[in-house]
Image (cartoon, helix red, strand yellow):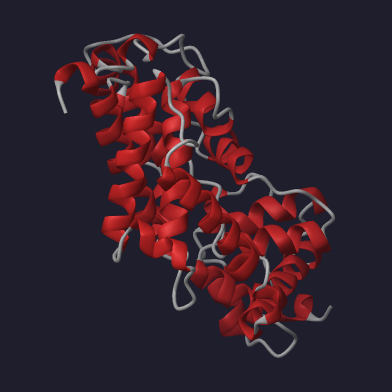
Amino acid sequence: MNNKQKNSLTNRAVTKSKGRYKNFQKNITNLEGLINEIDPFQFDIYQIEQTISFQRLAEKQNQLKLTLELALYSESLAKILGLNSKLSQAIALASNLGKGSNDIVLKDYIKRVHNSHFNSDIASLMVIKEIEKLNLSFETMEGIVYKDRQEEYMLVFFLQRFLNLVHGFKEKRPKELLYLGETKKEQLEALCKALIKESNQNQKITFKNSSQAQAFLLIEKWLKENIFFQSEKEKRYGVLWKKFYQVSKFLDKILEVEADKIPFILSLLTTNEMELLSSFNHKSSLKDIEEIKKLDFFKLLPYCPQTIITKKEFFW
């Protein structure tokens, strides 16, 4: 690939930031000010990676690994296409902060039980603004939610769908998947190459005309119909629903969390926290009850006071 092809989207790249969510005092005598002066989007990356919420992704079914993989691909492809690689990386790192463990099942549970539509992108913004209180650039925050406003946003959007697809299969697989390659690495490479080629040709991020794009859409549809949407028929889905219900009950009855905040809090819980909270009932011992006070999620929640919990409060 020659240099002209590599930089075909340079004219559409974000070259500077419009500013930050909150006023920021420029001070190049400290580390944060120096990083921001060099590259405002690098400063976003610095802020995100320092948060407890980002580190907790490691305890949400390998979400930290997937997020880092998304950031790596986003940065690499942005460089190839002549886009802002640091902005793409920052959006990728922040995009899963509000994504829950077993996110597909959680969204369906919230929709059916809480009669509410849960948007993990909005939840990520809530983590950034309400919990971690970060001061990110307008572009990084906008890119988490509004995928079609800049080329960098669209790039991360497609790459996240690619990763969701190749990591979404265990045993059942459609024949179209083999068209992309035998291994996950081969499949991702085929999708990324096709995205680069089509975007170069159209002078913007697009992915719909190539044979790989058509195969991708068919596989994505198959995945939703045969894995995600049908999972409620599987035993493990029933178990997860029961856990979500028990934790919702705990948040409502014991911590007195407002009903409209419960879906957001469910998305913050790690796999271990979900297991622990869902196991609490009237048979729980005082020792068990003491364990809940040690959970990290209490530190993250402006909605939940650190209440003193006694055994009698578990009789609901």
Residue at position x 46%, y 9% in the image: 18
Residue 45 located left or right of residue 132:
left
The image quarter containing residue 230 is bottom right
Residue 106 located left or right of residue 25:
right
Residue 267 visible in the current orientation: yes
The C terminus, quarter of image: bottom right
Residue 255 visible in the current orientation: no
Query: Which residue ends up furthest to the left in the rendered image?
Result: 2
The image quarter containing residue 277 is bottom right
Query: Which residue ends up furthest to the front in the rendered image?
Result: 211
Q: Is residue 73 above or below residue 276?
A: above
Front residue (pair 292, 222): 222
Front residue (pair 118, 48): 118
Front residue (pair 68, 79): 79
Residue at position x 30%, y 26% in the image: 86
The N terminus, quarter of image: top left
Image coords of residue 264 (percent x, y):
67, 50
Residue 139 located left or right of residue 16:
right
Image coords of residue 41 (percent x, y):
34, 22
Residue at position x 28%, y 49% in the image: 189
Image coords of residue 268 (percent x, y):
57, 55
Q: Is residue 238 above or below residue 306?
A: below
Q: Is residue 28 above or below residue 56?
A: above
Residue at position x 45%, y 78% in the image: 171
Q: Is residue 55 above or below residue 45?
A: below
The image quarter containing residue 229 is bottom right
| Numbered label tally | 0
Image coords of residue 87 (percent x, y):
36, 25
